Image: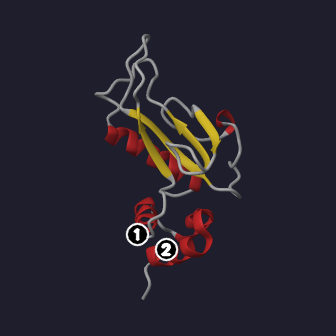
Amino acid sequence: MKTIKDKFKELLTLKGDEALLDARYMGIGHDDIFTAYDELGMDLPIKLLRNTNRYGFTDHGWGNGYVRIVEGHPFYGMEYMDIPVSVHGGLTFSQDIPEDDRHFPKGYWVGFDTAHYGDNSDTWTISAVSDETIVLFNQIYGLS
C-alpha cells in the first residue's frame, strides 16, 4: 500500500513543483514533502542563506529564510508586503529569480530576514531560522 509521501512523490514526478498546490488536500506534512524532493534530487522549495553583512546600526541573526511560490498559487508574483502571512519581522523579500542565479534555484521566492532591531545570533540561530522558514512554508501552502 502506498503512503501519502509515495503518492506525493509520484505527483511531484509528474507535475514538478506544481504538486505543492495539491499538498494541502493530501494531508501530507512538510517533512514528507522535503523528503520527496530530496529523494528525487530536486531543489527544495525552501532556502536558508547565512547573513554575511555586518550592519552598523544593529546586530543580526544567523540568516534569512525563503520559500519558493509556484506558478498557479494565489501569492505567485505578489509583492511581499501584500502577502498575508505572519513571520518574524514580516516578509522583506519577493523576487522572480532567473535560471542562472548563484544563490537560488529559478522561481518566485519570498522571504524574511533576521536583521531587525533586537535580533542577534543567540536568538536567531540556524535552527530558529529553519523553524521560522518552515512556518512560512506551511502558511503559504496551507499545511498544518
| SS label for mark 1 | helix
Residue type at mark 1 is Glu
> At x 33% / y 39%, what residue is drawn?
126
Q: Residue 26 location in percent, x, y?
A: 54, 71
* Residue 120: numbered disc: none
Q: Residue 42 location in percent, x, y?
A: 48, 63
Q: Is 93 left, or right, of 44 in this rendering?
A: right
Relative to 52, say whether 82 is above or below: below
| Mark 1 vs mark 2: in front | 1
Q: Does any portion of residue 86 appear in the rendered image?
A: no
Q: Residue 101 location in percent, x, y?
A: 56, 44
Q: Is 125 left, or right, of 87 in this rendering?
A: left
Q: CA distance from mark 1 to mark 2?
A: 9 Å
Q: Is 37 left, or right, of 91 in this rendering?
A: left
- Circle nearer the N terminus (1, 2): 2
- Name the residue that disc number 2 marks: 9
- Name the residue that disc number 1 marks: 39
Q: Are marks 1 and 2 in contact (CB under 8 Å)?
A: yes
| SS label for mark 2 | helix
The furthest residue to the bottom: 1
Residue 18 versus residue 42: which sits nearer the camera?
42
Residue type at mark 2 is Lys
> At x 44% / y 29%, what residue is drawn?
114
Relative to 50, say whether 34 is above or below: below
Query: Tag 1: Cα neighbours inside 10 Å, few (<14), some, or many (≥20)?
Result: few
> At x 39% / y 39%, what residue is drawn?
129
Residue 31 versus residue 24: which sits nearer the camera?
31
